[in-house]
Amino acid sequence: MYRSNVLVCGGTGCTSSNSPAVIEAMKAEIAKQGLEKEVCVVQTGCFGLCANGPVVVVYPEGSFYAGVTVDDVPEIVEEHLLKGRIVKRLLHVDEEADRDVLKSLNETNFYKYQHRVALRNCGVINPENIDEYIAMDGYAALGKVLTEMTQDEVIQVVLDSGIRGRGGAGFPTGLKWKFAKPNQADQKYVACNADEGDPGAFMDRSILEGDPHAVIEAMAIAGYAIGATKGYIYVRAEYPIAIHRLQVALKQAREYGLLGDNIFGTDFCFDLDLRFGAGAFVCGEETSLMTSIEGKRGEPRPRPPFPAVKGLFGKPTVLNNVETYANIPQIILKGADWFASMGNEKSKGTKVFALGGKINNTGLVEIPMGTPLSTIINDIGGGVTNGKKFKAAQTGGPSGGCIPAEHIDVPMDYDHLAEIGTMIGSGGLIVMDEDNCMVDIAKFFLDFTVDESCGKCTPCRVGTRRMYEILEKITSGKGEMEDLDKLEELAEYIKENSLCGLGQTAPNPVLSTLRYFRDEYIAHIVDKKCPAGVCKDLLTFTIDQDKCIGCGMCARNCPADAITRTDYIAPGHKLASFTIDASKCVKCSACIAGCKFNAISKK
């Protein structure tokens, strides 16, 4: 028994900030101080507060250290672990005054508004040690369903919990299982969508990195419920840490008899394989994903027949995403009523969001369904960066839409978001401030969709490109008012006629920005100006002659030789000022970056 446990984040975010070196330095310093029998260092998954990594938490105190470097390690070991004194300068606090008050992880604003179910073990256990997962009731749910419950009873619990798919469409999970169970076949399959292609989304990756056994256990439970003996986890190849930990977890589960033949001494046999995706966004769509697992080009198939009838290799298949599966063991152990008590009437449980963009606390947050967006932005997220005004939040990635500031108190659930023209999607939540151009944002997401379209159906392949060309025309100052009607007409046609969810939802960012920020589109078209100062073709750079002291830094930084000295000397200055030749200006902003006197502006 160790008197102290030092948990260090080993997720992708903290790893990129050099947490492996922090772990090694921590172990070496602990050994140097002769504390190796008293202090245990554990590499965990993501704690959630990615903005402040690497994260180190020391128990039993629960001291939450943020932004820890190798150079900080000796101080933590000597002061905290050896002498019992908290290193206050490294504590994550909401306000500087809080440094004098010892705060545990759960007392900070970032965590106290959260309720972690899918993320319950992330940042708590070593994901490469099955014994730690078992110590947290791991595989107890699988044991319960195999020895105490019938297939129908398992499905009924999932139905009664009200859990809906966390991957995008929000289809009731229990219904999927119920549809697949009665279909007779010599083989059935369970599949996991861990492709996660939305820009800014990293929920599933973090669960796989921090708690891979939860997904494995849930898939085995789903296999038992529908009568499947084989499963596949489809994970994108760009997730090397998640893949490694899945491979370790699968090996350990087989060694413990929790995968394979006669699990828990019953007649139930079930095993899993991994399949790696090549980064195609369309393979996040269920039929495309299954086609890819089969070794074919990842393209969607018409539905019906639905996967519950004819899925992988033409056999009945249940497909859920990582976050959905991560909830299942807890639903089985704690009951449907427990899960349904969280959230609201039509959106039960919790939801994980990847909070990014213009926000102080970037990272993963898990909140009860129906929590207001304002709570996420202002309380958990710590507000918009640099004191700027909140303008909008993009949810659902390229398939979603923008929530404007007027709806900042909207409950974050399936139905309320649908009412204002967006969706939860997989959980990406990108915050934007007054410096973001909403026309440019719509163009960014549509550009992504154009590149990621598989090209199988004409509405998506051609229609999204035509929409992108119109947006390009508008942002370059060549737009006409009738272009807005064309955008809306194309959007509706694409939504109604595309083969799969990628095309059907591709116009959403354009439609939502037209709905809430139409004045910005009009400013681009009529006034030939970008109100946010983002679209380069509509910008004009000018030098305030009276502020310019004539230092010449702007001219030296200009790559286009567009800045020359004038004959004008401002009152109080000794040197003549400079001016910008608009015909030569490439609008790179190098002049603004180099001016220390705020004499240059863009409009």
Image (cartoon, rainbow, N blue to C red):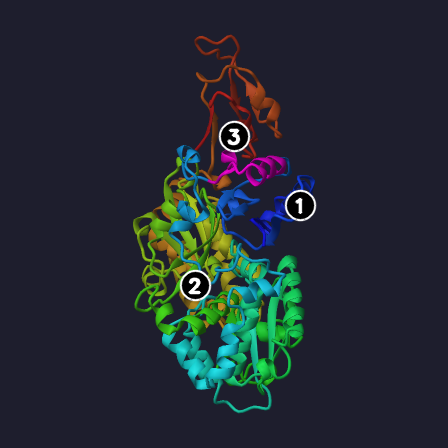
Disc 3 or 2, which lies upstream in sequence?
2
Magenta highlight on residue 82: yes
Disc 2 or 1, which lies upstream in sequence?
1
Residue 582 marker: 3
State the residue in front, 75 or 518.
75
Residue 490 marker: 2
Disc 3 or 1, which lies upstream in sequence?
1
Q: Residues within 10 Å of mark 2 (few under 14, many from 20)?
A: some
Q: Who's the residue at 47% across and 26% down the image?
A: 542
**Residue bearing the label numbered 1:** 27
* Residue 21 location (% of width, % of height): 67, 44
Marks 3 and 2: CB-CB under 8 Å? no
Circle 2 SS class: helix
**Residue 300 visible:** no
State how far apart marks 3 and 1 are (Cα): 59 Å
Q: Nearer the viewer, mark 3 or mark 1?
A: 1
The quadrant holding residue 378 is: top left
The span picked out in magenta is 72-92
* Residue 444 location (% of width, % of height): 50, 52
